[in-house]
Amino acid sequence: MAKLETKLTGNFHIILSRITSAVMSGSVTATLEDSSDFGQEGCRCAVRVFERYSSLGGNRVSLNITLFERGDELFLSAISSGGSQGMFIKMNTFGESSFLDTIRETVREFL
């Protein structure tokens, strides 16, 4: 598992769109598996679940994005998982880290 959490500044919809574009253009095998959007009383939350094939592990990895906005505060949580090998110990987590890396540059633009 790899995780990136941070506060952001900017427009909620633009950030979400840019992150989605970064994930989808980062791999020809990337897919948006599902999404959820919720808003109430000045808060918004968007959840996106992506998958892609990890050639190193020979399996698929997922990347879960949660973008939360309350007033002018934005918070991003991005967690990748899957793709590791081993029954009792996680080995070869390169695919998870690599998938998370597809959004790092985009996220830096909104720090």
Image (cartoon, rainbow, N blue to C red):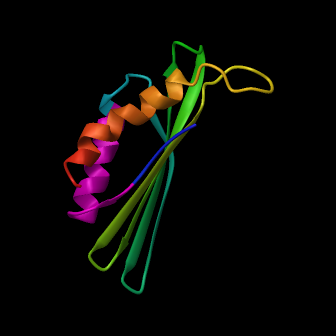
Q: Quadrant of residue 67?
A: bottom left
Q: Is residue 24 above or below residue 45?
A: above
Furthest toward the front, the residue is 89
- Which residues are drawn in magenta? 6-24
Q: In this rendering, does residue 61 appear at all?
A: yes
Percent x, y for residue 80?
52, 39
Percent x, y for residue 37?
45, 64
Looking at the image, which residue is at 30% across and 80% down?
71
In-image side of 17 versus 44 (left or right): left
15 is within the stretch colored magenta: yes
Looking at the image, which residue is at 25% across and 43% down?
106
Prevailing secondary structure class for the magenta stretch in the rendered image? helix
Furthest toward the right, the residue is 88
Percent x, y for residue 79?
51, 45
Tally of numbered tags = 0
Q: Quadrant of residue 29?
A: top left
Q: Nearer the viewer, residue 43 or 111?
A: 111
Q: Nearer the viewer, residue 70 or 1?
A: 1
Percent x, y for residue 59?
61, 20
Q: Is residue 92 above or below residue 45?
A: above
